[in-house]
Structure formats: structure tokens, C-alpha cells
Image: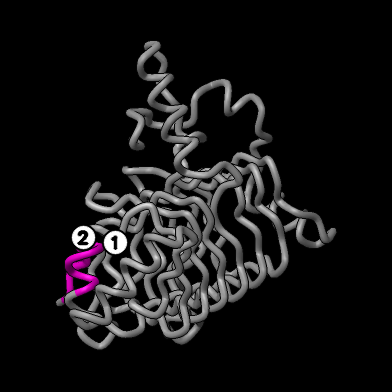
Amino acid sequence: MNEFGQDAAPKSEIEKLEKITREEVEARLARGENLENLYLVDLDLAGLDFEGKSFRGSDIRGVYFYGEKRDENGKIIELITNLRRSDFTDTTIADTGQDTIFGRVEAEGATFGFTEDLISRRNRHAAMNNSGERPDAADSGGLYGFNGGGGNFKKTKWDNIDFGGDSGSEALFPGADLSEGEIVGSDLSGLDLSTTKIDGIKIKDPLSLQGLIISEQQIDTLAKAIELSDEKERQKFAEEVKQKGSRKALEDYFKVIIK
């Protein structure tokens, strides 16, 4: 069941997306095709090469991009998926039931997120709720259930995302590498990046960092990573850092949690 109380995509979503199998995915890859506007829910796609491919508009909830198998000698072999430079813009990933497994993927240079900014989406959702409507899973703007443990996400781009912090289904990046990545206009509240590599990362105009968890070693890195377009806010935070130091400024100004 996802965050919107649905066990699967609504019928209207299923009807507008073409449902295909792993074998059909492999056939499309062999023809050099993208994987846009497809219903890929719960497919095992571990070990395939998606370098440079677009998943725009597809529903990939519950997909496995990581797996294991035994060779003829009984040795366990990891099935690592190549997602380098792939595009997941406006892809449905959010699910509070089964995770979407990006574990140990090679996703350097990939793009994630949504074209609609998160503030506009939330205002629109509020208006829908007031009128008795309810947004569906494809309209969440979230990465609930995203499991990127151990993945290579260097130089990735993340736009307008709710990472699902404190939902119980927040995105997971333990042991992952987000160095030199760029996160823009997103809500990182409650996200745990304490075991994630974030060297050289840029976090532009975050909607919230409240409850974001980092380690002692990441304090200066995070303080330097934050870029604010609002001049007053930028000056306020810079003054906080100057007067209190990076640790206290992050704790007081953004309510970051430091382990």
C-alpha cells in the first residue's frame, strides 16, 4: 500500500500506461529504445544495462534494480544494474509498502525528480483536499520507499522531491555515494545521510532540512553545500555560521541533527 492508501496504481493510471514484462524490457533495450510511459511495477530488472535511457512518465514502484544469483559452483554473484545518465524525471516511485530497490546501482549522472516544483504541488494538493479530492500515487512528488543502499549516485540531479522523511518509508541511502550531486527545491527533512558520501554536493533552496541526520564529519561539507537564492536568508545563515560555527548554525537555523 502506498502513501495514498492504494495497493496499486489506480485503474486510470494502468490504462494509460503500457504494461510489459522483463523480456519485453530486454527487447526494447536491444532495439535501443527508451522506457517511457510504461507500467513496470514489481518487475525484476536487476543486472540490465539502462545507461542513458529515459524512464520518464513510467510507474516503477516495487522494481528491483539489484539482485543475486548463484553460479554453477554455488558462489553468489551480484546483479548490478547500470543506470548511468538515465532519466527518472516524472517517474512514479513513491510507495510506502514495497521498496523500489536501487541498491548498489551504478547511477552516476542520472536525473531524478519532477518538473513541477514542490511548493506548487503541495498548494495544489491542499486545494484538492479542500474540495474532497485526493491526489493519486503518480502525483505524490515523493521518493517514499526508494532504497539506494550502497548505490553510486555521484553527480546525480534531484529536483523538486519529497524524500519522505519521518514517514516510515523515507528514501534510504546507507553507504551510498551522493558526492558532487545536486539537490534542488526538495524536502530533506528527516532524511538520514550520516553514512552517505556527500563530498562536493550542492543543496539548492531546500524546502526543509529539519531533522536531516548527518555525522560529525559531514558538518562543514553540509554547511558549504547549502545554496540559498533568497539574499536575506543567505545572509542570515552566513551570519549564523560566522557567529556560531557550522555545527551550531546547522542545528539552530535548519534544525539539522548531528550524530
Amino acid at the residue labelled 2: Gly
Amino acid at the residue labelled 1: Leu
Residue at coordinates 44% horizontally, 26% vertically from top-left? Answer: 135
Residue underneath mark 2: 211
Left or right: where 229 falls relative to 194: right
Residue at coordinates 38% horizontally, 31% vertically from top-left? Answer: 7
Q: Which residue lies furthest to the top in this view?
A: 131
Residue at coordinates 45% horizontally, 69% vertically from top-left? Answer: 227
Q: Which of 222 and 20 is in front in this view?
A: 222
Q: Does the magenta stretch include residue 256?
A: yes
Residue 15, position in %: x, y? Answer: 63, 24
Residue 258, position in %: x, y? Answer: 17, 75
How many marks are shown on the rendered structure?
Answer: 2
Instruction: Tell me, yes or no, if residue 70 can be seen here.
Output: no
Task: Name the element at disc 1.
Answer: loop
Q: CA separation, marks 1 and 2?
A: 7 Å
Mark 2 Cα shell of 10 Å, populated few (<14), some (14-19), many (≥20) = some
Q: What stretch is highlighted in magenta?
A: 249-258
Residue 199, position in %: x, y? Answer: 42, 85
